[in-house]
Amino acid sequence: MVSRVERGALADWFWTIDRVFLALFILLIGIGFMLSFAASPAVAERIGLEPFHFVKRHALFLVPAIATMIGISFMSPRQVRRTAVILLIVSLAMMLFALFFGVEVKGSRRWVNIAALSVQPSEFMKPAFVVVCAWLFAEHARQPEIPGNLFAIILFGIVAALLVAQPDLGQTILTTAVWGGMFFMAGMPWLWIGVLGGLGAGGFVAAYYVFPHVALRVDKFMTGEGDTFQVDTAKEAIIHGNWFGVGPGEGIVKRIIPDAHTDFIFSVAAEEFGVVFCMVLVCIFAFLVLRGLSHAYREKNDFNRFAVAGLVLQIGIQSIINVGVNLQLLPAKGMTLPLISYGGSSMTAICVTAGFILALTRHRPEKRAQDRTLFRVTHGLPAE
């Protein structure tokens, strides 16, 4: 046990970290590892690999992912900003590289091979993009003569263009929703809300007519016609599990779900552990998001407020998309369930997001005192 009277870096971290957030992240990681035993063996056998191939790789990914999360949580807000800027520059460069030299999978170029690893740069772009935009919005709020909002709009345009070029419409929608939420919190005028809302609607219509796979998925969702094997099988797995599931390892329908270990792991969880378990899982994500928004509401520092809110929104909206697809409430779209689904890039990138949240929500008494003094001085009140 770490004593309160110790003044080392580890003691300071332990007593200033938001331990509820830390427990939630560790809990979700543990649930994801448990579900990998249920979801991945059937997928591995179907493609000719040994049954626990993906389980072993999932465990291997967890070590650097958790280490990354803990390491980032030691950072100060200034270090978080600097890390995010570097990560954003590198990830954008790799996304551009992927368009010309990346690995093509199902018609999209999203992956870059580095040594023996396949990396999806857009996953790492997301948390870095949120933090950098939060910094730009905060600088504009602090000094209106600084065109932070304009720079954030330009940066969003660059990111959206690279995602559409891959193409990855799901990540584009996720990034747009998170960015729009942050811009709204930064005091976006109603005129901008109308203009950007119209551009978003126009972009969706354009995607429907420009990208055949988008039109196909929307049409299948609206009419129920065509090849709906994945979503139909996922729904069948959920129905088969009923309220309390058929038991660990006893799932039958999961064996024929194509992406059971990634996009449709929620359906596997429903079949083996039941709808009640899935409701608890959804509640964990909801509590995580609400806790983050509550912290952002109380935060005096604009950068911390925008960044924490944006990061938890990213996790929450991504979870909604994944669960919505599994429940046939949204058109089919490849989107992992944060900290649950298999995937090295996804797992590590979400742990980067978690590390940023832990770093920015740490209780720093001296920083809170500075913020209170600054607030009183800027509002014409005597300093404490």
Image (cartoon, grey):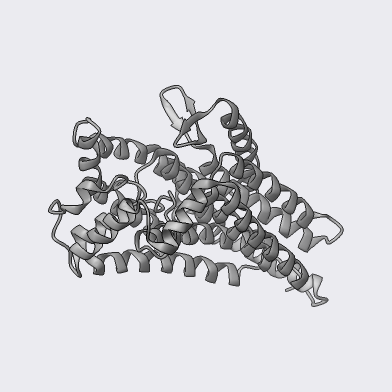
Answer with left or right where residue 15 lies relative to residue 210.
left
Quadrant assignment for the C terminus: bottom right
Viewer-side residue, 269 vs 242: 242
> Of all residues shown, which one is farthest toward the top?
115
| Residue drawn 59% across the image and 35% down it | 95
> Of all residues shown, which one is farthest toward the right?
145
Number of marks: 0
Give x and y (percent) for residue 56: 26, 36
Viewer-side residue, 382 vs 107: 107
Q: In which quarter of the image is residue 344?
A: top left
For residue 380, above or below residue 176: below
Answer with left or right where residue 212 lies relative to residue 205.
left
Give x and y (percent) for residue 284: 37, 65
| Residue drawn 26% across the image and 46% down it | 36
Viewer-side residue, 274 vs 57: 274
Answer with left or right where residue 269 lies relative to residue 200.
left
Give x and y (percent) for residue 77: 62, 52
| Residue drawn 75% across the image and 66% down it | 192
Whether residue 176 is visible here, answered yes or no, is yes
Viewer-side residue, 20 vs 276: 276
| Residue drawn 74% across the image and 49% down it | 154
For residue 106, above or below residue 128: above
Quadrant assignment for the N terminus: bottom left
Give x and y (percent) for residue 378: 81, 70
Whether residue 20 is visible here, answered yes or no, is no
